[in-house]
Image (tube, rainbow, N blue to C red):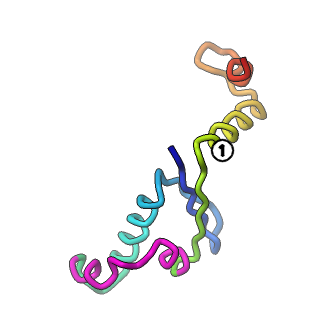
Amino acid sequence: MELVLRIDREVGGYVVFKSEDDLKKCLQEQDCANSTYSDEEYYKHNGHVSLEDFCDLYTYSFIKLTEEQIEEALGDYAEKHKLKDNWGEEAWNMIKK
Protein backbone atom coordinates (compact mmCIF):
# COMPACT_ATOMS: atom_id res chain seq x y z
CA MET A 1 0.00 0.00 0.00
CA GLU A 2 1.13 3.53 -0.71
CA LEU A 3 -0.48 6.93 -0.72
CA VAL A 4 0.44 9.90 -2.86
CA LEU A 5 -0.09 13.46 -1.66
CA ARG A 6 -0.55 16.08 -4.36
CA ILE A 7 0.63 19.40 -2.99
CA ASP A 8 -0.67 22.62 -4.50
CA ARG A 9 2.41 24.83 -4.43
CA GLU A 10 0.53 27.94 -5.54
CA VAL A 11 -2.55 27.90 -3.34
CA GLY A 12 -1.46 25.52 -0.58
CA GLY A 13 -3.16 22.39 0.62
CA TYR A 14 -3.03 18.81 -0.56
CA VAL A 15 -5.17 15.97 -1.88
CA VAL A 16 -4.60 12.27 -1.18
CA PHE A 17 -4.48 9.70 -3.99
CA LYS A 18 -4.08 5.92 -3.86
CA SER A 19 -1.31 5.89 -6.46
CA GLU A 20 0.70 7.95 -8.91
CA ASP A 21 -1.52 6.54 -11.68
CA ASP A 22 -4.64 7.88 -9.94
CA LEU A 23 -3.00 11.29 -9.59
CA LYS A 24 -1.97 11.34 -13.26
CA LYS A 25 -5.47 10.27 -14.36
CA CYS A 26 -6.99 13.09 -12.29
CA LEU A 27 -4.63 15.68 -13.77
CA GLN A 28 -5.24 14.38 -17.31
CA GLU A 29 -9.00 14.66 -16.80
CA GLN A 30 -8.59 18.18 -15.41
CA ASP A 31 -6.38 19.20 -18.31
CA CYS A 32 -8.75 17.61 -20.84
CA ALA A 33 -11.71 19.49 -19.36
CA ASN A 34 -9.75 22.76 -19.67
CA SER A 35 -8.73 22.12 -23.28
CA THR A 36 -10.53 22.99 -26.48
CA TYR A 37 -10.10 19.44 -27.82
CA SER A 38 -12.72 16.73 -27.74
CA ASP A 39 -11.83 13.94 -25.31
CA GLU A 40 -10.69 11.72 -28.17
CA GLU A 41 -8.50 14.43 -29.73
CA TYR A 42 -7.07 15.43 -26.36
CA TYR A 43 -5.89 11.91 -25.49
CA LYS A 44 -4.56 11.42 -29.02
CA HIS A 45 -2.35 14.51 -28.68
CA ASN A 46 -1.63 14.44 -24.93
CA GLY A 47 -1.83 10.79 -23.86
CA HIS A 48 1.97 10.63 -23.55
CA VAL A 49 2.32 13.57 -21.10
CA SER A 50 4.06 12.47 -17.90
CA LEU A 51 2.90 13.00 -14.34
CA GLU A 52 5.87 15.30 -13.75
CA ASP A 53 4.88 17.45 -16.75
CA PHE A 54 1.30 17.75 -15.48
CA CYS A 55 2.60 18.74 -12.05
CA ASP A 56 4.82 21.40 -13.59
CA LEU A 57 1.91 22.70 -15.65
CA TYR A 58 -0.39 23.05 -12.62
CA THR A 59 2.30 24.05 -10.06
CA TYR A 60 1.82 20.85 -8.08
CA SER A 61 4.33 18.59 -6.45
CA PHE A 62 3.76 15.18 -4.91
CA ILE A 63 5.22 12.83 -2.35
CA LYS A 64 4.78 9.10 -1.98
CA LEU A 65 4.23 7.56 1.44
CA THR A 66 4.96 3.91 2.13
CA GLU A 67 2.79 1.76 4.35
CA GLU A 68 5.36 2.07 7.15
CA GLN A 69 5.38 5.88 6.90
CA ILE A 70 1.58 5.98 6.94
CA GLU A 71 1.42 3.73 10.01
CA GLU A 72 4.02 5.83 11.84
CA ALA A 73 2.24 9.09 10.99
CA LEU A 74 -1.16 7.77 12.06
CA GLY A 75 0.27 6.32 15.27
CA ASP A 76 1.93 9.65 16.10
CA TYR A 77 -1.32 11.47 15.35
CA ALA A 78 -3.36 9.09 17.56
CA GLU A 79 -0.91 9.56 20.42
CA LYS A 80 -0.69 13.36 20.07
CA HIS A 81 -4.46 13.80 20.00
CA LYS A 82 -5.22 11.03 22.50
CA LEU A 83 -7.69 9.44 20.11
CA LYS A 84 -10.01 6.83 21.55
CA ASP A 85 -11.07 3.63 19.86
CA ASN A 86 -14.67 2.45 19.54
CA TRP A 87 -14.50 1.00 23.11
CA GLY A 88 -13.45 4.35 24.55
CA GLU A 89 -9.83 3.32 25.17
CA GLU A 90 -6.93 5.51 24.09
CA ALA A 91 -6.02 4.04 20.74
CA TRP A 92 -2.28 4.65 21.12
CA ASN A 93 -2.09 2.51 24.28
CA MET A 94 -3.63 -0.39 22.35
CA ILE A 95 -1.27 0.07 19.41
CA LYS A 96 1.85 0.10 21.62
CA LYS A 97 1.08 -3.32 23.17
Tell me where residue 75 appears, x and y as whole percent.
Answer: 70, 33
Location of residue 40 (image quadrant): bottom left
The amino acid type, in three-letter code, at marker 1 is Gln
Q: Circle 1: is it few (<14), some (14-19), or many (20+) Cα within 10 Å? A: few
Q: Quadrant of the C terminus?
A: top right
Q: Is residue 14 above or below residue 66?
A: below
Q: Which range of residues does the magenta coloring cover?
A: 40-56
Q: Residue at x 58, y 18 (%)?
A: 86
Q: Residue at x 23, y 83 (%)?
A: 41
Q: Is residue 74 above or below residue 11?
A: above
Tell me where residue 58 appears, x and y as whole percent.
Answer: 53, 77
Location of residue 46 (image quadrant): bottom left
Left or right placement of residue 37 versus residue 49 in this view: left
Residue 70 in magenta? no
Secondary structure beneath dot 1 equals helix
Using the image as rendered, state which of residue 44 and residue 59 is in the foreground. Answer: 44
Secondary structure predominantly adopted by residues drawn in magenta: helix
In the picture of the structure, the residue carrying the numbered disc 1 is 69
Q: Residue at x 69, y 41 (%)?
A: 73
Tell me where residue 14 appears, x and y as whole percent.
Answer: 59, 59
Q: Is residue 43 above or below residue 80?
A: below
Location of residue 4 (image quadrant): bottom right
